[in-house]
Image: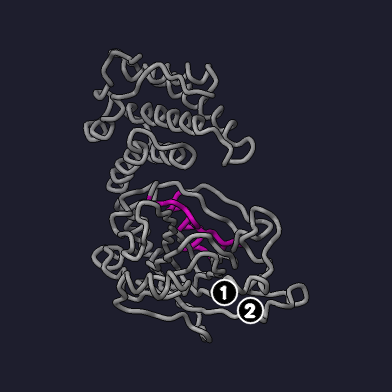
């Protein structure tokens, strides 16, 4: 059963209406399985407001209130128990409620655009993609409009963001091998099949992010400063006081990069699927040609100041780590060194060492000095291959942005 009416594009500015074309395919009533009848009814009522010929300001206020009620119910459902056990339909509920809240805000002339962007991002972070990822497209459009309106304010702040952090002076012992102009066949034969780390020095230098549109803190802010992202608080995820906060990229830069010296803790945008949330940034990069299964790649972004740390750990997939901004010190141990690295015993962190690489407790971990390793300082424009199950420790030496490609 469908609404039988037409979506009210006339409620929105013309440049927003063009983004909302997929909303015309909303089917009513909603009957998501496993979802409370009350919630399905509220979603259906919200949907109807945008297919009625005479939707009023009062109607929009009622719709926004209903959407907020649905979001509260869905939040409760999604935060009970483990995230992996959450019924996907509740994530769809969160996305739909976020969409209806956003539509209400867009249809009102007095709405704060930053509130609209935040509502989109919450739907993207907590929900599941719907209507060709419509929340991402709305957020991108409203974000670009807002940035244009507030450009003068951005220019006045830009000087504070122009920093030239100097990296540590590090003496390397057993350096990771570097290769230039390496073919994919040679990469597979000499490194993938033999499980050997390697630095590829020239394979990503043609990315726009490293050439025609060079990424910097200013560039990231210019593109996405009002977008809400999860920030890790604490130097590393093994710290007892480690936590996460949601904040805009602008607030993150202001607090944890520009004014880092004034903070007691370190903030880090770590292992986040930023390109799913802000796909226009993905236009500045391409998948490395060495990836052998391009239809099954997980991509994460790491962005933060000097001193951010990924503790010694391993991943089960192939990893190409691209350095786009700044430098990182990386130490790598092969899988056969595991007995010296004291893996943690709990399930969640069983891929992480108990050893604090910066202050190793040799009384508790006496075998650690016997472990052999390779190391490097990964520089902007370089790509590091880390084989599956190879232990690696990563520390940012200055303001840094990296991208991991796992497959």
Q: Where is residue 310 in the image (x, y as percent from the top left)?
A: 56, 65
Quadrant housing residue 346: bottom right
Q: Badge 1: how crowded within 10 Å, few (<14), some, or many (20+)?
A: many
Asked if the magenta segment contains residue 113, the reply would be no
- Say which of 395 and 49 sits in front: 395
- Say which of 298 and 46 sits in front: 298
Asked if the magenta segment contains residue 261, the reply would be yes
Which span of residues is magenta-colored?
Answer: 248-275
The residue tagged 2 is 371
Task: Kindly identify the residue that appears in the image at 48 percent across and 71 percent down.
Answer: 195
Q: Where is residue 194 in the image (x, y as percent from the top left)?
A: 46, 73
The residue tagged 1 is 333
Q: Left or right: 109 with respect to 231?
A: left
- Say which of 143 and 294 sits in front: 294
Task: Kindly identify the residue that appears in the image at 46 percent across and 77 percent down.
Answer: 377
Task: Kindly identify the residue that appears in the image at 40 percent across and 68 percent down.
Answer: 323
Quick check: marks 2 and 1 in contact, CB under 8 Å?
Answer: yes
Q: Is mark 2 on a helix, strand or loop?
A: loop
Q: Quadrant of the N terminus?
A: top left
Residue 78 in view of the camera:
yes
Residue 57 in view of the camera:
no
Is 4 placed above or below 165 here?
above
Q: What element carries label 1?
A: strand
> How many marks can you see?
2
- Residue lying furthest right: 363
Q: Where is residue 403 in the image (x, y as percent from the top left)?
A: 41, 61
Quadrant housing residue 200: bottom left
């Amino acid at each position: 059963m469908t609404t039988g009416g037409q979506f009210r594009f006339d409620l929105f500015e013309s440049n927003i209406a063009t983004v909302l074309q997929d909303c015309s395919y909303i089917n009513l009533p909603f009957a998501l399985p496993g979802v409370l009848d009350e919630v399905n009814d509220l979603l259906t009522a919200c949907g109807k407001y945008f297919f009625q010929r005479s939707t009023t300001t009062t109607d929009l206020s009622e719709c926004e209130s209903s959407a907020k009620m649905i979001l509260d119910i869905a939040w409760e459902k999604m935060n009970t128990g483990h995230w992996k056990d959450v019924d996907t339909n509740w994530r769809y509920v969160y996305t739909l409620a976020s969409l209806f809240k956003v539509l209400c805000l867009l249809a009102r002339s007095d709405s704060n655009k930053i509130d609209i962007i935040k509502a989109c991002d919450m739907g993207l972070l907590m929900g599941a993609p719907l209507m060709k990822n419509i929340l991402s497209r709305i957020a991108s459009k409203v974000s670009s409009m807002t940035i244009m309106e507030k450009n003068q304010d951005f220019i006045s702040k830009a000087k504070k963001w122009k920093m030239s952090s100097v990296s540590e002076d590090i003496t390397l012992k057993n350096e990771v091998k570097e290769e230039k102009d390496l073919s994919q066949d040679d990469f597979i034969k000499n490194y993938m099949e033999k499980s050997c780390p390697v630095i590829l020095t020239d394979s990503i230098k043609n990315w726009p992010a490293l050439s025609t549109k060079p990424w910097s803190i200013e560039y990231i802010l210019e593109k996405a400063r009002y977008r809400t992202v999860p920030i890790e608080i604490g130097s590393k995820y093994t710290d007892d006081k480690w936590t996460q906060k949601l904040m805009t990229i602008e607030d993150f830069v202001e607090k944890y990069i520009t004014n880092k010296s004034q903070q007691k803790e370190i903030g880090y945008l770590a292992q986040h699927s930023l390109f799913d949330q802000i796909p226009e940034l993905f236009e500045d990069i391409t998948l490395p040609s060495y990836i052998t299964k391009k239809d099954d790649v997980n991509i994460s972004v790491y962005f933060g100041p000097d001193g951010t740390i990924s503790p010694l750990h391993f991943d089960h997939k192939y990893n190409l780590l691209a350095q786009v901004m700044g430098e990182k010190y990386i130490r790598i141990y092969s899988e056969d060194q595991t007995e010296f690295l004291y893996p943690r015993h709990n399930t969640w962190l069983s891929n992480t060492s108990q050893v604090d690489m910066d202050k190793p407790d040799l009384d508790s971990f006496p075998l650690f000095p016997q472990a052999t390793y390779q190391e490097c300082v990964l520089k902007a424009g370089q790509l590091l291959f880390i084989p599956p199950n190879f232990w690696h420790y990563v520390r940012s030496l200055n303001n840094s942005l990296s991208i991991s490609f796992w497959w």
